[in-house]
Image (cartoon, rainbow, N blue to C red):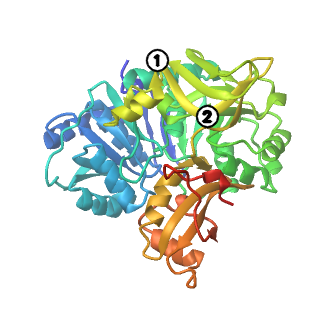
């Protein structure tokens, strides 16, 4: 089954497909016609299926662009318009994209990225496509047509790690998600998270399109609990997903109980460690809503396990049990922490142009997640830290090595180490330990952020800076990351 079949099956439906905050709406029949027409236009400009970066904020335009590319047989590269310029350029080049498709809001930034990557630009303008810039030269992709989506994960500065998700991977995850949560065609999904996240892309956007349900897009760049609640009330939303920082904001919203949120069946939360106080705060105030704790990773398309809808919430912060069709194994003695391994039809085919990294994480049919976990006596999985050094801040993965490489390019910095520091709002935040070339001339945090602007997305910026005379390393030159304090 192709991803485009999610929409194609509803070509005669009159149900609402997308409601854009306070903006326009469309139905499935209209979106089918628009996407098929645009796919023909794309074929004239591109000459055939290619890897194309989709660079847009949550809007009706991103939905139009996505389905236009899918109906044209293209592989969609999930670009993030909030990314720093250099990151965006690296992604376009690494994924061998000759074209960027963007919305009107992202057009100026897309043209700047296109200039740096020598790509062409196509803008979605009121359901139609507009050719804004032709490619300087055409790139040739190395993936097969079976790859539907290229989804970036955390990676180094020089070589992004991009998961190749086939049509089978994505559709298997959609089916597993529908079965696990017993979702229905009359569900109304509110998408708050950026659709460039694999979390929102598969577990919400494609899942509810496959069901022929209504999708409400939250288009504001900032999360406002009041607007969130008003959209649920107005559209009678039945399911939505948040990351822990947004869940905390919702729990601390003083007027939460005043809103009529009885329609909300599921409030899913994942992407970072679950703050228990916020979780129980929301559970107590929303008596008709089931909190569903989720776990996944981009390499698994992405959802792997859930605690809910039938799981015992007293097990929180357990991630529950694997979705249907997904196997989980823990490399350890029973009841002891070990690396969590998963396998199933939703596991990626590999990383794009990174065979060594692929071989490291995909072994004997199992995806090595890098997360440490254990099973309790009832079979529930509990996470117990990470084998890898990733910092998870507000649901975003930050590679400390990536930040360190950028910091070391600063003319005043001799060495740098970045690690996560616990934070009640974001779960954890990056902090930097710096060795200066001239210790007598320390820099401020504001000066450091000024240097990082345009080089790294702002969520990757260190939130605190500590100065050290030296960084402890092993004999082979590796940082003793946990000894830095």
Tell me the distance, in whole angstroms, between the alpha carbons under discs 1 and 2: 17 Å
Q: Which residue is mark 1?
A: 365
Position of residue 33 relative to residue 121, above or below, is above
Question: In the image, residue 368 lies at what x, y percent?
Answer: 53, 28
- Residue 423 or residue 435, whichever sits in front: 435
- Residue 301 shows up from this direction: no
Name the residue rendered at 37%, 33% in the picture.
Answer: 356
**Nearer to the camera, 376 or 78:** 376
Q: Which comes sooner in the sequence, label 1 or label 2?
A: 1
SS label for mark 2: strand
Of residue 381 and residue 219, the one placed in the foreground of this image is 381
Instruction: Say which quadrant the C terminus sits in.
Output: bottom right
Q: Is residue 145 above or below residue 455?
A: above
Residue 312 badge: none
Residue drawn at the location 44% of the way across and 30% of the way down: 360
Q: Is residue 330 left or right of residue 107?
A: right
Residue 297 x %, y %: 54, 34
Residue drawn at 66 percent across, 27 percent down: 338
- Tell me the residue at 65%/23% (across/down): 181
Q: Is residue 427 visible?
A: yes
Q: Quadrant of the N terminus?
A: top left
Q: Is residue 98 left or right of residue 386?
A: left
Pick whichever, 38 or 440, lies toward us: 440
- Relative to 185, does residue 296 appear above or below in the rendering? below
Label count reads: 2
Where disc 1 sits, the SS reads loop
- How far across and how far down the image is residue 191, in percent? 56, 42
Residue found at the far top of this picture: 325
Residue that carries the numbered disc 2 in the rendered image: 371
Q: In the figure, is residue 314 to the left or right of 407?
A: right
Q: Residue furthest front?
A: 475
Crowding at dot 2, Cα within 10 Å, few <14 / some 14-19 / many 20+, comes out as: some
């Amino acid at each position: 089954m192709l991803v485009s079949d999610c929409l194609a099956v509803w070509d005669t439906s009159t149900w609402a497909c997308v409601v854009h905050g306070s903006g326009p709406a469309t139905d499935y029949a209209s979106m089918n016609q628009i996407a098929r027409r645009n796919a023909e236009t794309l074929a004239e400009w591109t000459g055939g299926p290619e890897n194309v970066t989709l660079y847009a904020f949550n809007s009706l335009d991103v939905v139009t662009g996505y389905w236009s590319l899918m109906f044209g047989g293209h592989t969609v590269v999930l670009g993030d318009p909030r990314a720093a310029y250099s990151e965006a350029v690296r992604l376009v080049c690494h994924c061998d994209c000759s074209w960027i498709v963007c919305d009107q809001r992202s057009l100026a930034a897309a043209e700047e990225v296109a200039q740096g990557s020598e790509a062409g630009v196509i803008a979605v303008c009121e359901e139609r496509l507009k050719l804004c810039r032709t490619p300087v030269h055409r790139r040739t992709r190395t993936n097969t047509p079976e790859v539907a989506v290229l989804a970036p994960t955390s990676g180094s500065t020089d070589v992004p790690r991009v998961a190749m998700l086939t049509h089978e991977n994505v559709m298997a995850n959609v089916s597993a998600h529908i079965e696990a949560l017993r979702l229905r065609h009359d569900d109304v999904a509110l998408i708050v998270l950026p659709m460039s996240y694999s979390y929102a892309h598969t577990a919400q956007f494609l899942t509810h399109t496959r069901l022929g349900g209504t999708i409400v897009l939250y288009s504001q760049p900032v999360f406002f609990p009041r607007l969130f609640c008003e959209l649920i009330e107005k559209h009678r939303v039945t399911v939505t997903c948040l990351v822990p920082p947004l869940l905390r904001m919702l729990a601390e919203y003083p007027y939460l109980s005043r809103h009529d949120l009885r329609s909300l069946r599921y409030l899913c939360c994942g992407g970072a460690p679950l703050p228990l106080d916020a979780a129980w705060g929301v559970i107590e105030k929303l008596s008709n809503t089931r909190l569903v704790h989720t776990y996944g990773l981009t390499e698994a398309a992405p959802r792997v396990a859930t605690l809910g809808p039938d799981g015992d919430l007293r097990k929180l912060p357990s991630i529950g049990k694997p979705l249907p069709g997904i196997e989980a194994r823990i490399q350890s003695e029973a009841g002891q922490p070990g690396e969590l391994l998963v396998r199933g039809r939703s596991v990626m085919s590999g990383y794009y142009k990174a065979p060594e990294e692929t071989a490291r994480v995909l072994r004997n049919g199992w995806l090595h997640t890098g997360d440490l976990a254990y099973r309790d006596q009832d079979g529930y999985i509990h996470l117990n830290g990470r084998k890898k050094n990733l910092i998870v801040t507000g649901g975003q993965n930050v590679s400390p090595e990536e930040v360190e490489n950028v910091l070391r390019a600063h003319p005043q910095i001799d060495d740098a180490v970045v690690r996560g520091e616990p934070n009640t709002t974001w779960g954890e935040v990056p902090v930097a330990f710096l060795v200066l070339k001239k210790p007598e001339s320390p820099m401020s945090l504001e000066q450091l952020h000024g240097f990082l602007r345009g080089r790294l997305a702002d969520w990757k910026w260190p939130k605190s800076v500590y100065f050290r005379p030296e960084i402890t390393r092993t004999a082979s030159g590796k940082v003793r990351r946990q000894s830095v304090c």
